Amino acid sequence: MKISKILLTLLGVLCTTLSFAQGQTVRGNIISGSNEPMAAVTVVEKGTTNGIISDIDGNFELRIQEAPATLIFSMIGFTTVEKVVNGGEDLKITLKEDFLELEEMVVVGYGAVKKSDLTSSITSVKGDDLKEITTGNPVNALQGKANGVQVINGGGPRSQPKVVIRGATTINGSDPLYVVDGVPMGTDISFLNQNDIESMEILKDASAAAIYGTRGSNGVILITTKKGESGKTKFQFSSSIGFNTLAKPDLADAHEYEKVIQARFANDGTGSSWNGKTNWQPGEGTDWWDEVVNDIAMVQSHSLSFQGGKEKVRYSGSIGYYGEDSNFDTGYWNRINGRFNVGVDLTNKLDLSVDFVPVMEEWQNTPNALSSVIRMDPTTSVRPEGPLDDNEYNNYARSNNNTVWNPAGIVKRGETNQTSVYRFLVNPKLTYKPVKGLVIMTQYSVNSVFNRSNNFSPEFFIDNLERNDISSVKQKATDRIDWNWTNTATYNFTVADKHNLSIMAGYTAEKFSTHTMEGYIEGIPNSDRNLWYLSSGTLNPDVSGKSTYNTLMSGLGRFMYNYDHKYYVTASVRADGSSRFPTNNKWAVFPSVSASWRASQENFLIDVDWLTDLKLRGGWGQVGNQNIPANSYLDLLKDADYIFGGDRWVGTSLSQLGNTNLIWETVEDVNVGIDLSMLRGRLNVVGDVFQKTSRDMLLTRENLLFLGYPMWNGEMVMNVGSMQARGWEFSVNWQDNIGSKWGYDVSLNLSSVETKALTLVGDKPILEGDFNNDFIIRNEEGGLISRFYGYKTDGIFQDMSEVYSHTNENGLVLQPDAKPGDIRYKDLNGDGIIDENDKDFIGNPFPKLMVGLNIGVSYGQWDLKTNFYGTFGNDIYNSTMTDLDGGTNRVNVRAGAYDQAWSGPGSTNSYPRLTEIDPNGNYRNVSDFFVEDGSYFRCRLIQIGYSVPSRLLNGKELRLSLSGQNLFTITNYSGMDPERAMSGDSVISSGIDNYGYPNPKTILFGVNFNF
């Protein structure tokens, strides 16, 4: 202790001595709120790097560079103080304790509370942290920043991230509910400008999410946007521009491709059926990646926002643009959005706030051409020989040796689709405070979305296997108008100074309506752009349209109590009535209760110097799921054609078999957690253990009573099945300053979750992932979801003696079609036959551990921000190996495939021989040969920034930055992107790599200017 005091004193004296170099001297003493001298407080002249730290007695002495100047006094765990000085002063500065985030307000459902008063598991992410990543969808920036939240990003413009909060408990989607400024917005917030976000709160357990009832089963993310403040108008301009680039896969050239195909012919003993030129030389042939995939694709984001107001009027607004191109010649996404808010104090008790949100989007779908680019044989040229045709879509060469369609032609035809979306959200809110502590609020929002899509399918002929004989146009208009009316009354009061209570009651009503009109016609005279409309067609016109409605009515309430800020109890209940369910089952009730003990406020801990805060939490709750078609309980009819005596008669038939016994799907959640803050808030630790269990899961399944009616499998929506997710979360954050110039913060979050299917459709497993007339994934009762199921392998047969020795107890060869170089399969059940009964689970796509690491460092005007994310212990089924290693359809192969394949005894025990017939099923059987370790650790962001001293800009703030996103990935996976492979269609079909568009590497230059 004495040594530390001496060092601090010497450091303070040294810094004081150095500060005599120029300017006028300011002296002073710094004390805490309890009148204790404060050592190591940072004192900095604003807009400069001129600074010092206080000595052990709280004294400081600093020469300012110019007068007047503003001095900033700061220390972790205390409020920051700014003081204007002219020089020669002798100051007395008091810093009051501020437990940083412990006392910040956190948004909860239909309200806000101090973070120290939370009893549930809620993670808060500030908008400034989200802005570090440039992306069109704010959810992408959440990856690695929120514990227990798995964000799987997809590549390509307007790709939707897959979000899983604490595992999945239903097969009816995993996306959480997004609520923006109190308005439920469904599961897509791609319309939102991330620069408009003030904060995101992730409600992870049911004790927090139960207040949203029917739609909270996958978690809830509350988003608060920026609002105006009284005072001078402030403007913020942010801009970033750069490019995306994709890592090029290592594929064979024409020389190696020919060698592989000819070797397959030789090994199979079949005659060569090679087409086209022979004897290709190294480096020759068409590099389809270079021909079709652009090296760079532009991405840019620009935003101008402002806030200001007077005593009774506050306003804010923003206008933003985001644009991103695909790495093909076609495919892009442009978005222009605005957000305007006005707040008015109508009286001293009545406030009005109105949000206006206009958004315009336009996109061209990114062509699904990556598979063709990789698989197309390199002996084929882009264009055919001879003169070009008048129809530009005909001018592409046909593959010489496989059935893959020309990827350049696919990209060209991709330009014929276009989608435009116009959205307008208006959200007025009245707040009335008749007496102290009572707040009555009514809010009515209308969200209108108008979607227009136009798709022209051109006529073209490349050859009999690659053609479209008649051109067609499809135009579709989808209009969605949703409204939400929310009314709440909240009363906060205190009894006898120690009993703090908050009571909230509310009522909500919502209506969702969708109107669709679609037209289709064939026989467009030619492919001129001016004819890509319905009125240009001449054959087979067809038109359809429908309107769908569903409504939701809810009553809700919450009770919060704490005694002396030590003991907390929160209880909530929501009753939901939904039109999606039959009359007798429309209503369901979702309760929750949670409690916490703030042990650090107890007498036996309150004087512990190193302990800032300690809280133990526990909660239980129920949430629901109504994610089924609106009319699932009804028998529906559709138009149908009947033939009698050779004549066509238009009639009706049953299109849906309804289930009048449907009830809500319910998820029950239990959570136990701890919040720990130490060393005046420098070190913060959060830990949670949880279990979520669903019941009455809504599934579409075969109804044996009506099998074959009205469709071949007689499906209907039923309440069958149950899933359970168990896991834990742990996060630690450290932040501190070193002297007057250096600052740093490090946060690490770890989480793990395991999801099981407790019950499914009777004893019948749910199979997913088609693969050569088989399935890759098997979901069965009592087991983990989405596991790979297939044969286990045992190396490669090196010679015929090994083939003949692989026998059953009767001496019969287990794999009679095998030859040296083929895969050896294990006879797991020992019955002497290799068949379906020898299959077993061979991989799990869900990670055992998810890791997020964020590191920030600052020095003077410079700062460095980094973000890393990774998953460990997960597997990927690399189905692309069927093409790039096997003999499927003679598609192209990996570079090095010829040398790596088995070519004789001892050559390899990993890659089977080259064969096209493949009688052993090396590449046609589902097996662990295709299963790879999908673990990865990715550098999501490295950003270096420089803030120009504000004194050079007359008090304005300018920051310049250079960023790299997805710069590198550490992984053993051989495919293009281990993360992209995890984005399956649903949680029970994850982990299969099918040539998904990978996450690009992005380089960006950014400017932030506040004035």
Image: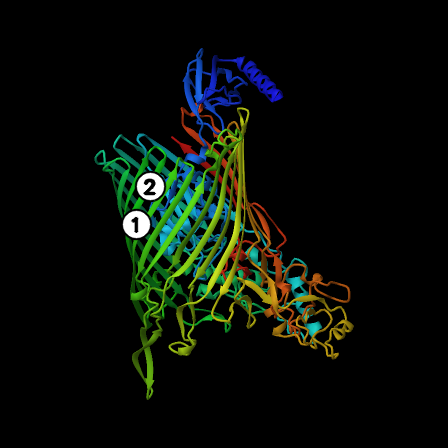
Near mark 1 (Cα within 10 A), the count class, few <14, some 14-19 or many ≥20, is some
Q: Earlier in the sequence, mark 2 or mark 1?
A: 1
Q: Is residue 989 visible to us here?
A: no
Is residue 178 or residue 525 the one in the foreground? Answer: 178
Position of residue 547 measured from the top left corner of the image (x, y, whole percent): 28, 64
Near mark 2 (Cα within 10 A), the count class, few <14, some 14-19 or many ≥20, is some
Residue highlighted by disc 1 = 424
Mark-to-mark CA distance, 2 and 1? 35 Å
- The structure residue drawn at horizontal position 60% and vertical position 18%, both measured from the top left corner, is 6
> Dot 2 lies on which element?
strand
**Residue 720 numbered tag:** none
Is residue 107 or residue 242 the one in the foreground? Answer: 107
**Which amino acid does the dot numbered 1 rest on?**
Phe
Res 200 → quadrant: top left
In the image, residue 614 sits, relative to residue 537, either above or below, namely above
Whether the residues at callouts 2 and 1 have beta carbons within 8 Å, the answer is: no
> Dot 1 lies on which element?
strand
**Residue 502 numbered tag:** 2
Farthest bottom residue? 645
Q: Give the mark toward the camera: 2 or 1.
A: 2
Res 214 → quadrant: bottom left
The quarter of the rendered structure image containing the N terminus is top right
- The structure residue drawn at horizontal position 49% and vertical position 63%, both measured from the top left corner, is 409
**Which amino acid does the dot numbered 2 rest on?**
Ser
